[in-house]
């Protein structure tokens, strides 16, 4: 997935190149999946787009000044690597930390982290503690984190709830999702996003599997996949993972090798055709991704 931390602070973060076809993030990842999946995200530093009045964005200089940072301190921040790329490696399970790897070091994000302010404070304390006094870094983290959380609650949460409504979540389940995401907005949309870990507080594995199947089925059908194939793919995790890999290859402009692929729902050659169709249709799977990440 590719995104900018400028987007994280001011607007909803969109992590997937194909609206759910190629892997990011962490969106809807089931507990217990492998932590080997790594995403690379360009980072533009802790604070970029914030507002004091709706519709009135503040410039970088204004935000830094508000935090009390001098030009020298700002330069030091830039040299820490927070302006470069960051690799995001999910934990092996929901009780393991997510790891952010910046050019200058790694930041382990514990599963207990809930807000954007906590996340930004952790990043700054780990990578930039020598750049400015603690109070200035705390203020910077608070401004940045508040903007990230505001975007998550105002922009991303209503979309997530609508998606889960379409997936069959009950009113009580959606009420729980609303409450839990408001309590942990950084887990919905940020570098530490892991919506699946939050949704696990509101629905058991069977219910979440039902939501996932519904979302995948809808996405396949909307992309023109025949109903019989779509129904099979939506309920066969192994085939969905094979298809996800094929979609990633096609998205990169390459031709998947189907010689070693043994799907259940269709032939290997047909799976490649479906992957091409999904990329062409910019298939949207709502709150889910094909990879489950």
Image: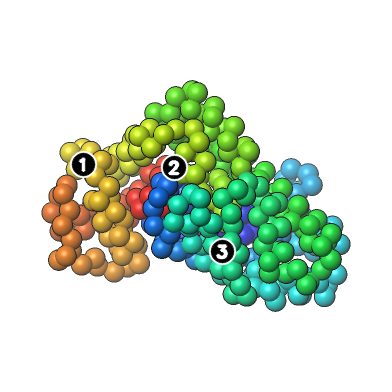
Is there any visible trace of residue 199 in the rendered image? yes
Query: Does residue 191 lie above or below 84 as drawn?
Result: above
Between 242 and 163, the one lying in front of the other is 242
Q: Residue furthest top?
A: 171
Residue that label 2 marks: 287
How packed is label 1: few (under 14 Cα within 10 Å), some, or many (20 or more)? some
Q: Is residue 242 left or right of residue 81?
A: left
Of the residues under marks 1 and 3, which one precedes in the sequence? 3
Residue that label 3 marks: 100
C-alpha span from label 3 to label 2: 23 Å
Between 282 and 87, the one lying in front of the other is 87
Residue name at image x 80 percent, y 56 percent: 139
Residue that label 1 marks: 232
Give percent across and percent down for residue 53: 78, 44
Are the residues at dot 1 and dot 2 in contact (C-beta closer than 8 Å)? Answer: no
Is there any visible trace of residue 24 in the rendered image? no
Are the residues at dot 1 and dot 3 in contact (C-beta closer than 8 Å)? Answer: no
Number of numbered tags placed on the structure image? 3
Give percent across and percent down for residue 262: 15, 57
Q: Nearer the viewer, mark 3 or mark 2?
A: 3
Of the residues under marks 3 and 2, which one precedes in the sequence? 3
C-alpha span from label 1 to label 3: 36 Å
Q: What is the secondary structure assignment of the residue under circle 3?
A: strand
Residue name at image x 54 percent, y 57 percent: 97
């Amino acid at each position: 997935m590719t995104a900018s931390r400028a987007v994280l602070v001011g607007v909803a973060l969109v992590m997937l190149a194909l609206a759910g076809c190629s892997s990011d993030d962490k969106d809807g990842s089931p507990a217990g999946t492998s932590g080997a999946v790594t995403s690379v995200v360009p980072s533009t530093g802790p604070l970029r787009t914030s507002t004091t009045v709706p519709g009135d964005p503040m410039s970088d200089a204004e935000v830094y000044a508000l935090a009390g940072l001098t030009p020298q301190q700002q330069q030091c921040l830039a040299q820490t690597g927070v302006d470069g790329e960051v690799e995001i490696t999910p934990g092996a399970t929901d009780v393991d930390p997510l790891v952010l790897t910046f050019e200058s070091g790694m930041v382990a994000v514990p599963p207990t982290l809930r807000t954007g302010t906590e996340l930004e404070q952790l990043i700054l304390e780990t990578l930039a503690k020598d750049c400015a006094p603690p109070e200035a870094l705390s203020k910077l983290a608070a401004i940045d984190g508040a903007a990230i959380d505001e975007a998550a609650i105002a922009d991303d949460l209503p979309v997530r709830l609508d998606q889960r409504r379409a997936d069959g979540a009950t009113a009580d389940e959606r009420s729980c999702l609303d409450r839990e995401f408001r309590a942990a907005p950084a887990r919905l949309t940020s570098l530490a996003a892991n919506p699946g870990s939050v949704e696990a507080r509101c629905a058991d594995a069977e219910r979440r599997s039902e939501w996932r199947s519904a979302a995948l089925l809808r996405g396949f059908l909307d992309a023109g996949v025949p109903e019989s194939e779509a129904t099979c793919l939506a309920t066969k995790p192994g085939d969905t993972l094979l298809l996800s890999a094929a979609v990633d290859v096609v998205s990169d402009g390459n031709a998947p090798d189907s010689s070693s692929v043994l799907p259940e729902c269709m032939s290997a050659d047909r799976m490649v055709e479906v992957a091409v169709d999904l990329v062409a249709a910019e298939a949207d799977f709502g709150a889910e991704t094909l990879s489950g990440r």
